[in-house]
Image: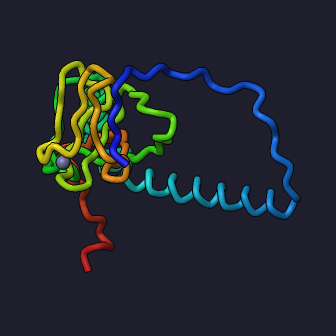
Amino acid sequence: MRFQLDAPLRCAPLKRGVRRIDMDPETRRKLKKAGKAEIERQSSELHAQLEESNPADIGDPQWAANYREVTLKEKEYKKNRSRVYPASEVGVELLLNPVNIDWSRGYLPVQGYYLQCKSCGDLVPMNPVVKLTCSCEAIAISSNIGEISFEPHMVVATKLIAKASHGQTKQKKWWQFW
Ligand SMILES: [Zn+2]
C-alpha cells in the first residue's frame, strides 16, 4: 500500500464511550501479562538508550555538562521542521526511541516525531514547514498534508534522543584494571 493523499485529512475526534469487550478472566489475565512484559521490554530498551545518551556517572561533573548538552539538542530535535537528519548521525549524534503509529487513522503529524527511512536511514520530521525528502526519496513529506508519500512498512516512526559528545570520560575503577 502506498500512502498517498489527494485531499487534506481532517483529524477525526476520538471516539467516546467505546464499548467494553467481554472476555473471560483467563484471556484478560494473559493479555494483561503480555502488555506488562511489552512495557517492561520497552522501558529497559529506553533505559539502555538513556545510559548511552549520557554515560557519565551522576556524581561526575561531566554528567551535568552532558545533561545540558543533551537537553539543548533535544529541544532542537523537537523544534526542527526544516531539516532532515542523515543516517550517519544515528548512533553518533542521536539515538532512536521508536513510537507506534496506527497509519489506518491517516497521517496525523506529531511535532518532534520523525520517520526513519528503512532503506537510506535518514530521519525526516513528520511535521515540516517545507517539502522534505530522505536521500533515496522513498519518503517525501511536505507542509501540505495532501503531498505526503511513503510506504508505511518502509518507515519507522521515532522520537530522537540526543547523545552527549563527551560520552566516555568515566575513569575505570581500580578493580577494573585486571
Ligand atoms: Zn530513504
x then y, percent, for residue 41:
53, 59
Q: Quadrant of the C terminus?
A: bottom left
Query: Which residue lies most toward the bottom here?
Result: 178
Which residue is at 84% across, 64% downward?
A: 26
x then y, percent, for residue 153:
36, 53
State which quadrant residue 84 falls in: top left
x then y, percent, for residue 134:
17, 41
Which residue is at 35% across, 48% downward?
A: 156
User: How many labels were placed on the picture?
Assistant: 0
State which quadrant residue 30 falls in: bottom right
Q: 65 and 9: which one is in front?
A: 9
State which quadrant residue 17 falls in: top right
x then y, percent, for residue 79:
28, 22
In the picture, measured across the screen, residue 74 lies left or right of residue 135, that is right
Which residue is at 40% across, 47% downward?
A: 98
Q: Is residue 147 above or below residue 136?
A: above
In the picture, measured across the screen, residue 2 lies left or right of residue 89, that is right
Which residue is at 49% across, 57% downward?
A: 44
Q: 140 and 52: which one is in front?
A: 140
